[in-house]
Each structure stands twice: as C-alpha cells, then as structure tokens.
Image (spheres, grey):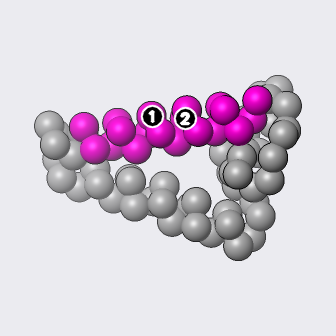
Amino acid sequence: MLNTYFRVIVGTLVLLSVVLAVYVNINWLWFTVFIGVNLIQSAFSKWCLLETILVKLGAKKDGGSCGI
C-alpha cells in the first residue's frame, strides 16, 4: 500500500508544480527539480522522507526506499 500512496502523492506534486509553473510563476519548476533530486538520492541512500512520514501515518511498508 505504501508504494501506491507514494506514487499518487509524488505524481500529484509533480503535476501541481507544473500547473503552478504555467499559471503562477516559472520558478515553481524548482519544486519539480527538488522532487527529482530526492528520488535520485533515495536510490543511493535507501532513505526517503515521504516513506518515513507515510509509515508514521500508518501505511503498511511493502517496498524499498521511496516505494520502489
């Protein structure tokens, strides 16, 4: 279940930042960059803040770092 939550949240945040970049300010794309960098670092460190938050909120862990 953690994997599903993770993918929905990250996908929503990426789409939201793109919409905000188009309609509000182009600098919102830095949020998309931040998400991408965190995904890359989690592949190497095997630690993901979103995963930690979701587990504390009660999501059942079913995968590796960042639900992948």
Direction from residue 21 to residue 52 in the image, left or right = right
Establish if 30 lies above or below 54: below
Q: Is residue 34 visible?
A: yes
Q: Position of residue 20 (x, y in %)?
A: 24, 39
The stretch in magenta equals 1-19
Q: Which residue occupies the foreground of this view, 1 or 13?
A: 1
Query: Which quadrant of the structure image shows residue 30?
Result: bottom left
Circle 1: residue type: Thr
Q: SS class of the residue under badge 2?
A: helix
The residue lying at 66 percent from left, 32 percent from top is: 4
The image shows a total of numbered marks equal to 2
The residue to which callout 2 is attached is: 9
| Farthest-out residue, bottom | 44
Circle 2: residue type: Ile
The residue lying at 85 percent from left, 31 percent from top is: 60
Instruction: From the image, give the main secondary structure of the stretch colored magenta.
Output: helix
**Do callouts 1 and 2 mark residues in contact (Cβ within 8 Å)?**
yes
The residue lying at 75 percent from left, 35 percent from top is: 2
Direction from residue 44 to residue 41 in the image, left or right = left
The residue lying at 28 percent from left, 44 percent from top is: 18
Q: Position of residue 6 (x, y in %)?
A: 63, 39
Q: How far apart are the two marked residues, 1 and 2, measured between alpha carbons?
A: 5 Å
Query: Which quadrant of the structure image shows residue 47?
Result: bottom right
Q: Is residue 56 visible?
A: no
Q: Position of residue 51 (x, y in %)?
A: 73, 45
Asked if the magenta segment contains residue 30, the reply would be no
Asked if the magenta segment contains residue 5, the reply would be yes
Label annotation for residue 26: none
Mark 2 Cα-neighbour bin, 10 Å: few <14, some 14–19, many ≥20: few
The residue to which callout 1 is attached is: 12
Mark 1 Cα-neighbour bin, 10 Å: few <14, some 14–19, many ≥20: few
